[in-house]
Image (cartoon, grey):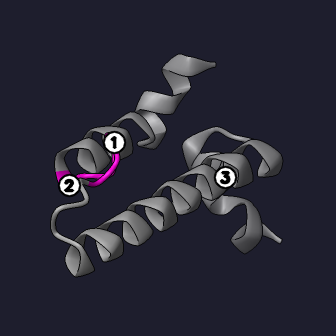
Amino acid sequence: MKFFTKHLDEVGESYFKHAMHALSISCRYQIAAYTQFVHAIFPFVAPTPGTDVCSMINYLEKKLPENRRDDC
């Protein structure tokens, strides 16, 4: 069972809290992928704010385990 909880202990989160963070990142990536796909086909359609590469990097830095501990 230690294998299952090792990462959760390292980041200091419960299973549910960790799942919510991972799902929020997954959803954000999915939205970004869809908007970039539309932009690739229709270059005149600008991607929605927050789905460009710089915005995604900033978002992921906020979601790092050491930065999430400050949110608690």
Q: Which residues are magenta?
A: 47-53
Q: Residue at x 50, y 67 (%)?
A: 30
| Residue 8 badge | 3
User: Where residue 3 sits in the image (x, y, percent)?
Assistant: 70, 73
Q: Residue at x 23, y 53 (%)?
A: 46
3 or 2: mark nearer the eye: 2
Give the alpha-carbon distance from disc 2 to disc 1, as whole Å. 8 Å
Task: Report how many numbered discs are placed on residues in the image.
Answer: 3
Q: Is label 2 in a helix, a strand or a loop?
A: helix
* In this picture, residue 58 sits left or right of residue 12: left
**6 up-or-down from 34: above or below:** above
Q: Which residue is mark 1?
A: 50
Say whether residue 4 is left or right of residue 65. right
- Residue type at mark 3 is Leu
Q: Nearer the viewer, residue 69 or 38?
A: 38
Q: Secondary structure at mark 1?
A: loop
In percent of width and height, residue 18 lies at 68, 49
Crowd tier of the residue under label 3, counting other residues whose Cα lies within 10 Å: few below 14, some 14–19, many 20 or above: some
Residue located at (34% from left, 47% from top): 48
Q: Are marks 3 and 2 in contact (CB under 8 Å)?
A: no
- As displayed, is residue 40 above or below residue 56? below
Q: Are marks 3 and 1 in contact (CB under 8 Å)?
A: no
Q: Three-letter amino acid code at disc 1?
A: Gly
Closer to the camera in the image, 13 or 55: 55
Residue flagged by tag 2: what amino acid is it?
A: Val
Number of residues whose C-alpha sits closer than 10 Å to that of mark 2, classed few (under 14), some (14–19) or many (20 or more): few
Residue drawn at point x = 72 percent, y = 54 percent:
19
Image disc number at residue 53: 2
The image position of residue 49, as x and y in percent, is: 31, 40
